[in-house]
Amino acid sequence: MISPEQIYAEAEQRRTANQLAYAGALSPAESLELLKQVPDARLVDVRTRAELDWIGRPQLPDTQYIHIEWSRYPGAVPNAAFLDELRAAAGPDTPLLFMCRSAARSKLAAVAATKAGFSKAFDLLEGFEGDKDSQGHRKNVNGWCFRGLPWLGA
């Protein structure tokens, strides 16, 4: 078992190597391990409600799972209340692991959270579904689902 300190060190190495504007980046497995070992850590799913309804979500205790849309469906309209909703759900020192479909919106959310004063904002690499394969399908290359981590289907 990898310790939280080791997980944070890996995230910091990625932050430094990639000049990230947030606390760091975690693999799906590191994220799940951190959630298991750090009771106040939260996974912040920034996908749309439609994505959760149609695709599914990580299977985590409700106390560790937060859903806050980065953008609204339909139309990808930015969620102007994102930071207010985040502040209502977590404190500034709470370890926050931002996740989206393929780790694009989650990076933006981690940057915004960091700028807003959240000191432990991390990006969850690969996202929930991961990258597309050669046929344009997800969940076959990488991501939370591909890695066999617990999730609830739609």
Image (cartoon, rainbow, N blue to C red):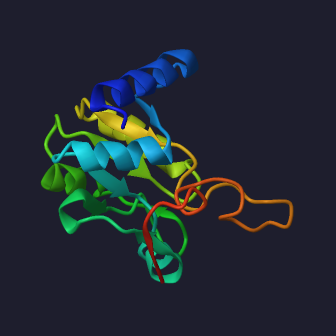
| Left or right: 22, with 85 as reference point | right
In the displayed structure, 131 sits above or below 74; it is above
User: Taking the image as drawn, is residue 36 in sight?
Assistant: yes
Residue 52 in which image quadrant: bottom left
44, 63: nearer the viewer? 63
Residue 60 position in % (x across, y down)? 30, 64
Residue 103 position in % (x across, y down)? 55, 48
Residue 96 in which image quadrant: top left
Which residue is most to the top?
A: 16
Residue at image point 16% right, 48% down: 39
Residue at image point 71% right, 55% down: 141
Placement of the N terminus among the 4 image quadrants = top left
Residue at image point 28% right, 61% down: 65
Residue 93 position in % (x across, y down)? 16, 34
| Left or right: 7, with 141 as reference point | left
Which residue is most to the front?
A: 1
User: Taking the image as drawn, is residue 108 in sight?
Assistant: no
Residue at image point 14% right, 55% down: 88
In the displayed structure, 71 sits above or below 9; it is below
